[in-house]
Image (cartoon, rainbow, N blue to C red):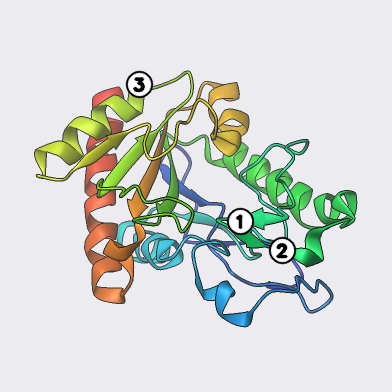
Amino acid sequence: MIDGLPFRQIGELKRGGMVCVADHASNFVPEDIPLGIARELLDQHVAYDIGVAGVAGRMARRYGIPAHLATVSRLVVDLHREEDHPNVVPTNSDGHLIPGNIGANTQARLDTYYRPYHEALGRWLDEAQPELIISLHSFTPKLATSEEDRPWEVALLYNEDDRAARHAIRLFSELGLSVGDNEPYSGKDLNATMNRHAEAHGRYYCAIEIRQDLIANRAAQSRWAAMVADVCGRVALALD
């Protein structure tokens, strides 16, 4: 965390432009929160969205798309869940028990991390009045608790408002990619941040999921940053 804040903002905010939001960009766990898990789990997808911080950072620095990124692991508090969601402080993740979260003070975690993150994001978006929000995530090719492969290279999630997603699905498909439509999980069930900060305000958004093995190194992150910036720029034009 930077200056004790559960978020960081990079890039210059320009009113009416595109912005990026990454709820799961960090695997940081504060020292005063003992999760009781093996250290190596913090480098796996249960702790954060692998590759997303690198993609978002490159989009901000190279393509002028400022970003609001989480600086705390979803194992501390999941910023992409509603406050009253039973897994906002997860006790299990992809078959791994998180013993330190059993009986955790959920309200304290909400007060310290969750609410400041979303309050700052709300103010940032109010100032930006963005033409398009890019909600950036990554997903694992296969869950440890499932034998089912996830073949998509990129996917678009949405709840009620699929206007931007429809354009993005088409444009990514035209690049020859395998594109998921509300896969590998549905935005009807998992869209908390965009429900709150986009759909509730009538803002256009693309909730993009990239398969994590495709953005595992800097070269791949640069490639996807360019691709996402280009596709979303064309989506914004189509929605204008």
- Vertical placement of residue 217 versus 81, above or below: below
> 10 Å neighbourhood of mark 1: few (<14), some, or many (≥20)?
some
The residues bearing labels 3 and 2 have C-alpha atoms spaced at a distance of 38 Å
- First in sequence: mark 3 or mark 2? 2
Q: Which residue is mark 3?
A: 163
Name the secondary structure under disc 3. helix
Above or below, comparing residue 79 to residue 48 in the picture: above
> What type is the residue that disc 3 sits on?
Arg
Give the numbered dot on residue 98.
Answer: 2
Tag 2: residue type? Ile
User: Mark 3 near mark 2, Cβ–Cβ under 8 Å?
Assistant: no
Give the percent coordinates (x, y) of residue 219: 24, 74
Residue at 21 percent of width and 63 percent of height = 223
Q: Is the N terminus in the top left, top right, bottom left or bottom right quadrant?
A: bottom right
Q: Left or right of 42: which side holds 109?
A: right
Q: Quadrant of the C terminus?
A: top left
Q: Position of residue 191 (x, y in %)?
A: 54, 34
Of callouts 1 and 3, the N-terminal one = 1
- Does the CB distance between marks 2 and 1 fall below 8 Å? yes
Q: CA distance from mark 2 to mark 1?
A: 7 Å
Q: Earlier in the sequence, mark 2 or mark 1?
A: 1
What is the spatial separation of the Cα atoms under label 1 and label 3, in whole angstroms? 32 Å
Count neighbours of disc 2 (C-alpha within 10 A) and say few if under 14, some if 14 to 19, many if 20 or more. some
Residue placed under numbered mark 1 in the picture? 93
Above or below 93: residue 193 = above
Kindly indicate the quadrant of the structure image that contains residue 236: top left
Determine which quarter of the picture holds residue 211: bottom left
Which residue in the rendered view is the most extreme toward the front?
147
Residue 240 seen in the figure: no
Compared with 22, 208 (above or below) is above
Q: Nearer the viewer, residue 238 or 92?
A: 92
Helix, strand or loop at label 2? It is loop
